Amino acid sequence: QGADIINISLSRNSKSWPKSWDSAFSYAFENDVIVVAASGNRLGEQSNPSAPATMPGVVAVGGVSKELVGAEFASTTGISLAVTAPAEDLIGSYPGGQVRQWDGSSAAAPLVSGLLALMLEADPSASANDLIQRLIASSSDLGEPGFDAVYGFGVIDPEAAVESKLTSQQNPLGSLAEWVRLYRPG
């Protein structure tokens, strides 16, 4: 339908996804579309990201508090997490023209999608892979040095992301096509 960026602020509460998603997400990636997904929120013992955030190539977004601390209430942790963004006391629109306060990775993911849209506006010739590379490379590293399971590559830095000119020939978050080739039966 001509989208450049798709935001998915939902999860399945499962690391796996239906086989039918393989072709839908592959179609998006093959058409230079970025898919951003909420990592999911902690539910009791459940603390790992769930699909679609676990899918290779998807920008999985976790949440941080106002103090830039990994928001335990609002974000899962795990190796598929790409970046984090504010996830506390955000304002969003609801059906019927309502506006409400909300928290969690589902609130953080649209901030990342909006940032990617600003990045694309600043450089319309950038590919989806370029924009993802710029997003993760410009993030402010928090927690353990480098990539970690709480912050991913770090908390987004909008100014640095928009100014970045990095490029990438492949999706730095992995290849769904390669995953399907390796792990889906014949």
Image (cartoon, rainbow, N blue to C red):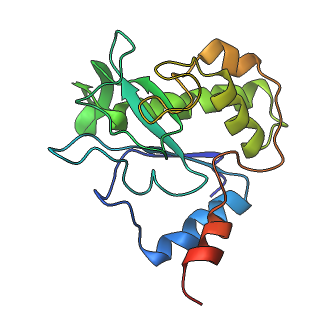
Where does residue 150 sit, x and y in percent of width and height?
Answer: 41, 31
Please tell me which residue is depicted at 71% across the width and 49% down the height of the picture. Answer: 171
Q: Is residue 98 left or right of residue 2?
A: left
Where does residue 68 sit, x and y in percent of width and height?
Answer: 39, 14
Q: Is residue 151 left or right of residue 146?
A: left
Q: Quadrant of the N terminus?
A: bottom right
Q: Nearer the viewer, residue 175 or 92?
A: 175
Q: From what the image shows, is residue 167 above or below residue 19?
A: above
Q: Is residue 134 left or right of residue 144?
A: right
Could you tell me how many numbered marks the image carries?
0
In terms of image quadrants, where is residue 184? Answer: bottom right
Q: From what the image shows, is residue 107 above or below residue 22?
A: above
Please tell me which residue is depicted at 44% across the width and 36% down the height of the picture. Answer: 149
Q: Nearer the viewer, residue 168 or 115?
A: 168
Please tell me which residue is depicted at 28% across the width and 31% down the height of the picture. Answer: 74
Where does residue 179 sit, x and y in percent of width and height?
Answer: 61, 68
Where does residue 27 sit, x and y in percent of width and height?
Answer: 65, 66
Please tell me which residue is depicted at 53% across the width and 24% down the height of the picture. Answer: 154
Residue most toward the front?
144
Q: Nearer the viewer, residue 93 or 108?
A: 108
